[in-house]
Amino acid sequence: MSTTHTTSSTSLGRAALIGAVAGVIASLVMAMYAMVAGWVQGTGFFTPLYHIASVVAAPDTMMTSMESGMAGDAFTFSFGIAMLGAVVHMMTGAMYGAVFGALVARLRLGTLALTGLGLVWGAIVLVMSAFVLLPLAAAVTGAGEPIADMASMAGWTTFTVEHLLFGVVLGAIVGTRLARPAQSASPASAY
């Protein structure tokens, strides 16, 4: 049974790039979970995208989508605002992913361990986002409560699951890209 370990020769730049790409993919998985949760909770399927977009756009589309969702129309769609929300979300995922990739680049851990570290990273991202970065972004952009209080507006359970899911997917992808088979010591290498 062979184990895998991250290679010590992995460059930080390559690891950050792998993390960024993995972060985009993980952010898409996270967004899909959030959208299904919005639909199930009756606040609208596309509302999470509009919510994210409200960091730089007026929250009108988000509010309309929420009101429509509560009235039974779960699929109110506005292409431009949805794409803006998706881009902001993927850029954020890429940033968090790049940092994760760079942090784990030199660790000699297998894919499973990196997936576990991804879960921990998702929890760190949750805390940083909810208590530092979203309130800061709301203050800087003037977006106000919809962004500063995103965790409570989305629901803490949903917000937590989203971020843990992001971390697991990120860690698994980074783990499969940075891990390599462990080399067994041959008798000749002992001399």
Image: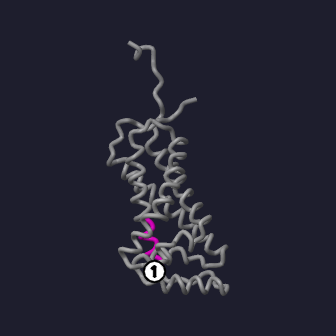
Residue at figure coordinates x 62%, y 64% from the top left:
157
| Mark 1 residue crowding within 10 angstroms, few (<14) / some (14–19) / many (20+) | many
Residue at figure coordinates x 43%, y 84% from the top left:
58
Residue 84 magenta: yes
Tell me residue 41's x, y (percent).
Answer: 66, 74
Tell me residue 90's x, y (percent).
Answer: 44, 65
Instruction: Out of 8 and 149, give the one closest to the viewer.
Output: 149
Tell me residue 116's x, y (percent).
Answer: 54, 46
- 101 relative to 155, above or below: above
Tell me residue 77's x, y (percent).
Answer: 54, 83
Q: Which residue is mark 1?
A: 81
Quadrant assignment, res 98: bottom left
Q: Main secondary structure of the magenta part?
A: helix
In which quadrant of the rendered image does the N terminus lie? top right
Q: Which residue type carries mark 1?
A: Ile
Residue at figure coordinates x 42%, y 64% from the top left:
92
Q: Could you tell whether 117 is left or right of 38 in the image? A: left
Rendering colour mode: one colour
Numbered circles on residues, count: 1
Quadrant assignment, res 11: top left
Q: Could you tell whether 72 is left or right of 159 in the image? A: right
Residue 13 magenta: no
Element at label 1: helix
In which quadrant of the rendered image does the C terminus lie? top left
User: In the displayed image of the protein, which residue is found farthest to the top?
Assistant: 191
Residue at figure coordinates x 57%, y 61% from the top left:
160
Which range of residues does the magenta coloring cover?
A: 81-90
Q: Could you tell whether 185 is left or right of 153 in the image? A: left
